[in-house]
Image (cartoon, rainbow, N blue to C red):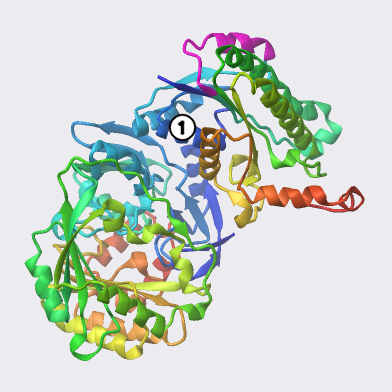
Amino acid sequence: MNCSGWGQYPKIKCNRFKFDKEASLKEFISSHNNLIPHGNGRSYGDSALSENIVDVRQKDYFINFEEESGLLHVQAGVLLSEILEHFVPKGWFLKVTPGTKLITVGGAIASDVHGKNHHVEGCFSECIHNFNIMLVNGETATCSKETTPELFKATCGGMGLTGVVLDAKIYLKKINSQYIDQTTIKTKNLKETFDAFEEYSDTPYSVAWIDCLAKGDEIGKSLLMVGDFRDDGKLDYKAKKPKSIPFNFPSFALNNWSVRAFNWLYYGKVKERVSKQRVDIDTFFYPLDAIGHWNRIYGKNGFTQYQFILPKEVSYKGLEEALTAISKSGKGSFLAVLKLYGKANDNWLSFPIEGYSLALDFKIEKGLFELLDQLDEVVVKYGGRIYLTKDARVSKKTFEKGYPHIESFRQFRKESNMDSKFQSLQSKRVGI
Amino acid sequence: MSYLLIIGAKSDIAKAIAREYAKNGYNLYLAARNVNELETFANDITVRTQKAVKLIELDILDYESHHAFYDQLEEKPLGVVSAVGYLGDQGKAQFDFSEAKKIIDTNYTGVVSLFNIIADDFEKRRSGFMVGISSVAGDRGRKSNYTYGSAKAALTAYLSGLRNRLHDAQVQVLTVKPGFVATKMTKDMNLPEKLTAQPEEVAEDIYTAQQKGKSVIYTKWVWRYVMIIIKIIPEWKFKEMSI
């Protein structure tokens, strides 16, 4: 069957394996190579693509919840959206959530995802008590930061290359409202945007939408949105039904002019420099989940997301350079997200480091890869790194430079014979 | 406390229905053969929703046991959903009558036996709802699965008559005709994406239609129109076709 990630690029033929019992997974692992676990298919590029895909999505049982500690035990195929649906009304929320709730718990571990509160709570691995993982020899290991530190550091952020996560115990956090008090700060340039991030660094959630087609003095103009949960006891959360885009848009629908118009409207609808809103969980955390199959607006050739992060001390210079290159190319992205991150963790391939990250969506078209190569140079020059979960094309050379622990990861995979069994198109390309 | 009884509870559609009703406040009786295999699933629902889930052994082909099965339910259910289904092997059913009989008895005879008992109770209580999952395969016989299709056609006619009978007693009878659904039963078929529903969509459609008091639904809804076209094809032409 045909398989692709969320970006619909690349598309390959693959063999999808679903399993009911652990014994059949064990048998499948022992009799196949080129395996990669696959959750809800929301990583953008080729992280979860391989000749043989182990489909974990249907392993979606809730196993236990401890009310006193907020410890939730679920199978790896449970979606974050399912956790929210059942637990927000009881006053619980995810400690760490990315910008989509349509990912599995297994996927959250493999990508060691992060969210708007990275500067406060860190990555998803911070909320993990432990998890069970089926290793290359078919044995199941219970893994936690304390008991099996190497396996933990390799698996959290390890893109599914260490085995198949079967279930996990994660801590939820207490909330007393499904609403967030949001403050929107409108900035005129990159300097103002950076200042605003610093000014609001005590607010637990923050992210900026940045107009990446802005030119000259306006480069870096943004809407910074920060917020925190209210305390009004309103927990009547009901997930909104997404409106779905039923088919791929023609590829010309998204172009320099339509993106420019969108950015103009989006930025222009905010009048004051600082404004306040009350918004719900879905609006604040998951705006794009409101549109099912939004990936189809990029057309059938697909798109890629380019997300990189630069160390804080060089972020300003590096971003200015990157934004200038993007603006010049005219290859705009109307989903461009800027965020200030907190400290890096110990996991070998987790993406976040302390600094600014920029994420941009690009339609696959002529000239795009040349632009991305150019951006790679900026990233390498300033000691930054690329996020594997979004990637479909980065070179081995560029990738390795950003991840100083890469040899530990490679060594660990080799010693445990994982490297000959678990592989994705991406792992082969970047040599991990 | 209000219970929904689901028979044939091991199927993927049944499981999705169980989650949908539990989410909307129902406790559950889940009935199936070797029902203890549903223990982790029952636990899943309890952790998600804190609703009570009771597992009850049921062999749909052991008609003699059906009275005892229903009598043992201390609190009678508000409604029942039959998700019993056995596609079987059409090729085998053509030369091996035991396969044909199994297809007919599972999809039709067994459900009739049990629904008769429950219908009597609901009729006396003058309340309740009965949902039977039939199939679009029952709308017209095709060479690829006409044994299954004929059993579902019989079930559709049975449900229609039952609805007529129970109307005065204010008992709702809902006939559900799913088209393609991505389940264990169809996992080896190459189904067209646009016409194929996920079990969760079917469950949601059923819950909504049942709550609204509907009589017959197709799911996905587009199948109503697909089947209108398929039914309209004249027999002289249909018999030549391979669909």
Nearer to us in this view, A157 or A230: A230
Quarter of the figure with residue A196: bottom left
Image: B99 above or below A340? above
Q: In the image, residue A331 lies at what x, y percent?
A: 37, 84
Total numbered labels placed on residues in the image: 1
Whether B73 is among the magenta residues is: yes
Residue at (72, 35) in percent of width and height: B88
Image: A41 above or below A214? above
Question: For the residue marked with disc 1, what is the amino acid?
Answer: Tyr
Q: In the image, residue B219 lies at what x, y percent?
A: 61, 44
* The C terminus of chain A, quarter of image: bottom left
Quarter of the figure with residue B71: top right
Image: B123 above or below A52? above
Whether A200 is among the magenta residues is: no
Residue A102, visible in the rendered structure: yes
Q: Chain of mark 1?
A: B
Q: In the image, residue B28 lies at what x, y percent?
A: 46, 24
Q: In the image, residue A74 lies at what x, y percent?
A: 35, 39
Highlighted range, magenta: B63-79
Q: Which residue is most to the right? A: B236
Nearer to us in this view, A40 or A242: A242
Nearer to us in this view, A402 or B222: B222
* The N terminus of chain A, quarter of image: bottom right
Residue at (48, 32) in percent of width and height: B18
Can you identify the residue that label 1 sits on? B21
Residue at (41, 37) in percent of width and height: A61
In this rendering, position of residue A196 left or right of residue A5? left
Residue at (55, 13) in percent of width and height: B125
Would you call the spot at circle 1 few (<14 residues within 10 Å), some (14-19), or many (20 or more)? Answer: some
Residue A39, visible in the rendered structure: no
In this rendering, position of residue B211 left or right of residue A112? right
